[in-house]
Image (cartoon, rainbow, N blue to C red):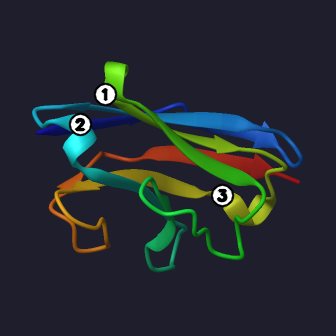
Amino acid sequence: VQLQASGGGLVQAGGSLRLSCAVSGLTFNMYDMGWFRQAPGKEREFVGRIRSTYYPDSVRDRFTISRDNAKSTMYLQMSNLKPEDTAVYYCAADRSRVTIRSAYWGQGTQVTVSS
């Protein structure tokens, strides 16, 4: 199983980025998938998952998760980015509900938001 996260980069505050997580080695539409992020010195934080409309307050109304089953890819559309969104973003997959303890993780992609 491989999860390949991409799309990170440097963006100014107020800008947008779209992250991608390409998946291979599992039946994509049978798995829950989600995004997490980890800022320096902080714990890994849940950002959202495909099988839920819940987003934490820190990203609600700015981040949206979607998936393309035909491409076995999950996306994280981020808008109105803030410096506090700076982190390494990870995607994860789970046969049931994706959590911090899920078995399958991507390598992470760095997002840096400048003020």
Give, as a three-letter code, the residue at label 2.
Answer: Phe
Among the 4 quarters of the image, the one containing residue 19 = top right
Q: Where residue 79 appears, x then y in whole percent?
A: 78, 45
Give, as a three-letter code, the residue at label 3.
Answer: Thr
Left or right: residue 66 compared with residue 98: right
Left or right: residue 33 compared with residue 68: left
What label sits on residue 72 in the rendered view?
1
Q: Is residue 30 above or below residue 37?
A: above
Q: Residues within 10 Å of mark 3 (few under 14, many from 20)?
A: many
Rendered residue at 58%/69% (across/down): 54
Q: Where residue 60 appears, x then y in whole percent?
A: 72, 65
Cβ atoms at labels 1 and 3 below 8 Å apart:
no
Q: Residues within 10 Å of mark 2 (few under 14, many from 20)?
A: many
Please tell me whether mark 3 sits on a helix, a strand or a loop.
loop
Q: Earlier in the sequence, mark 1 or mark 2?
A: 2
Q: Nearer the viewer, mark 2 or mark 3?
A: 2
Rendered residue at 69%/36% (across/down): 17
Location of the N terminus (image quadrant): top left
Q: Is residue 32 above or below residue 26?
A: below
Cβ atoms at labels 1 and 2 below 8 Å apart:
yes
**Residue that sits furthest to the top in the current view:** 70
Left or right: residue 79 compared with residue 99: right
| Separation of marks 1 and 3 at Cα, in angstroms | 26 Å
Q: Which residue is mark 3?
A: 86
Q: Earlier in the sequence, mark 2 or mark 3?
A: 2
Please tell me whether mark 1 sits on a helix, a strand or a loop.
loop
Give, as a three-letter code, the residue at label 1.
Answer: Ser
Q: Which residue is mark 2?
A: 28
